[in-house]
Image (spheres, rainbow, N blue to C red):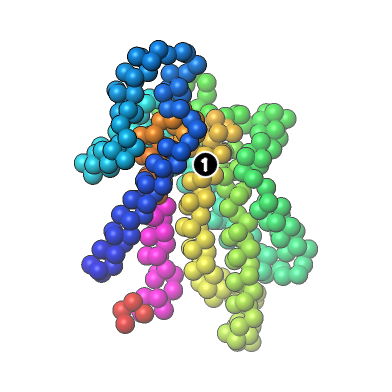
Amino acid sequence: MAKKILQNILKMLLLLTAVSIITFALAELSPIDTVSAYIGENSLSPERRAQIEEYWGLDEPAVTRYLKWAGNILHGDMGTSMIYRKPVASVIGERFSLSIRLMFVSWVMSGVFGLMLGLIASAYRGSFIDKAIKVYCLINESSPAFWIGMVLLLIFSVKLGWLPMGLASPIGVSVEEASLSDRIRHIILPAMALSLTGISKITLQVREKMIQVAESDHALFARARGESKWQFILRHGLRNVMLPFITLQFGALSELFGGSVLAETVFTYPGLGNVTVQSALKGDIPLFLGIALFSALFVFTGNLIANILYSAADPRIREGGRA
């Protein structure tokens, strides 16, 4: 167990190092001028520009700046955001508290509905229900998240007026002061847009795996004992599809994190995705690097949890590990 933990820690450190180097290099190659993006359209004298570059350390070589930043990271300091003039860790913590609600609701919705639709499609294989679910999945899979978000806005906000068009709380009311019902109403549309993009993969994979299980010998034996279709699915089939389901569900965390950027932008949801766009457009390199490291750590943790759950879902993996 100690060896396994050490291996995971080494993998995480290598991943974070690679992500930080690649992200910093891409930020340096970006055509966005950090000082101009920071000040705006106002013209600057050479003296004033030099002062700003010296204040933020932009006058130093790129390698020197990266090594200083990496050294500060090792001491727990992620730097100061140029946009918000606050510690990067504080900005990420505040905005991620909103994003995690959105991502969790979307993650649960995509998992529950994807599993249900996959089981239903496999149970009624070849029927109209199965074909309708497959068509829905193919259309959904080929539709970008921002387009789905705009369609949901047009239907439920503009046409019907049932739900608000954006934000995490009513205008003029902070998220902390908003009532629970207001927060739920504001999170429904972005959660729907984000979850719909992840349902298709889970549905199609669960359907294919369930069909394979239904054609196996123990399925034939179960039917010979008098078990109905749904009895077999719930007693035997569900356990067999849990392994690919867990893989897809936790593997989708990276897509979920990336999709939240688009969903939060469309719905002006003030989460971490919105901050990511702002930090990239305005050249806030400390904040951009901090978000990149945090997202990599978030996805790595999700995959690690999936590996732990494998042994609970499939006893063969647990016994193999003991052997």
Query: Which quarter of the picture shows residue 62?
Result: top left
Residue at the outermost right position: 128
Residue nearer the viewer, 178 or 132: 132
Relative to residue 155, is residue 222 depicted above or below? below
Using the rendered image of the protein, determine whether residue 271 is visible from the camera's viewpoint.
Answer: no
Residue numbers of the magenta segment: 298-319
- For the point 57% across and 29% down, the residue is 166
Residue nearer the viewer, 64 or 210: 64
Residue nearer the viewer, 300 or 270: 300
Secondary structure under badge 1?
helix
User: How far across and down, in percent of the image, does residue 74 sit?
Assistant: 23, 44
Q: Is residue 187 magenta?
A: no
Q: Is residue 317 magenta?
A: yes
User: How far across and down, in percent of the image, does residue 313 sit?
Assistant: 44, 70
Query: Which quarter of the picture shows residue 218?
Result: bottom right
User: How far across and down, in percent of the image, does residue 27 sit?
Assistant: 43, 38
- For the point 44% across and 30% down, the residue is 283
Using the rendered image of the protein, determine whether residue 115 is visible from the camera's viewpoint.
Answer: yes
Residue neighbourhood size for the residue with mark 1, other residues' Cα within 10 Å, grouped as few (<14), some (14–19), many (≥20): many
Relative to residue 23, is residue 306 depicted above or below? below
Locate the N terminus by quadrant. bottom left
* Disc 1 target residue: 260
- For the point 30% across and 23% down, the residue is 54
